[in-house]
Image (spheres, rainbow, N blue to C red):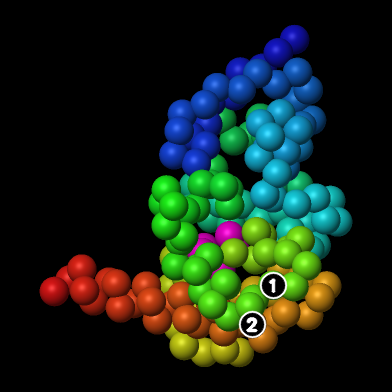
Amino acid sequence: MSLALNLVLNGQPRTVDLDDPRTTLLDLLREHLALTGAKKGCDRGQCGACTVLVDGRRINSCLALAVTLDGCEVTTIEGLADGGRLHPVQAAFVNNDAFQCGYCTPGQIMSAVALLAEGHAGDDPERVRELMSGNICRCGAYRGITEAILEAHRTLADTDREDAA
């Protein structure tokens, strides 16, 4: 028996037929939809490598059953850029060398996008580190990650001011 799952995936409506109701969102993305940006790290929700946005909120996709997300909007790292223009968080990660091996980078970026959208970080590096603590970088690129998020915060704040003027 197949279950029809309706999602808005990276801005595009999609209907996916699921054969197994136990399929996680991570497995749906990687194995059924060939979206491999979200990484399979611990498969227990402890590392954050699989972080994606569901209705604008960051989640560990390895812990979410895909069938529970019918009607939701899912954004992955593949849907973050605007055409050829990087999202400000992506650009800040490049500018600040906020990655080494790159395995955790998509999850770090997705978590940072949500963190900034939530408006919790501000310009406080300690607060950024605390709010990003669910995303592990085994290479130890935390300083660059923190600097990238702070830069993206400034960039987004400047854009908001320009838009308001």
**Which portion, as a residue range, is magenta?**
110-115
Residue 66, image x, y percentages: 67, 34
Which mark, by number, is residue 99? 1
Residue at the top extreme, as displayed:
1
Question: Circle 1 — which element?
Answer: loop
Residue 128, image x, y percentages: 58, 81
Residue that numbered label 2 is attached to? 144
Residue at the image position 74 percent from the left and 73 percent from the top? 100
Residue at the front extreme, as displayed:
84
**Cα distance between the residues tagged 2 and 1:** 7 Å
- Rendered-image quadrant of the C terminus: bottom left
- The amino acid marked with disc number 2 is Gly
Q: Nearer the viewer, residue 17 or 95?
A: 95
> Which quadrant of the figure has residue 109?
bottom right
Q: Nearer the viewer, residue 41 or 59?
A: 41
**Total marks placed:** 2
Decide if residue 117 is on the left or right side of residue 149: left
Whether residue 19 is visible here, answered yes or no, is yes
Residue at the image position 76 percent from the left and 47 percent from the top? 62
Residue 53, image x, y percentages: 56, 51
> Which quadrant of the figure has residue 36?
top right
The verdict on residue 113 being magenta is: yes
- Rendered-image quadrant of the N terminus: top right
Question: Circle 2 — which element?
Answer: helix
Q: Could you tell me if the residues under marks 2 and 1 are in contact, i.e. CB atoms within 8 Å?
A: yes
- The amino acid marked with disc number 1 is Phe
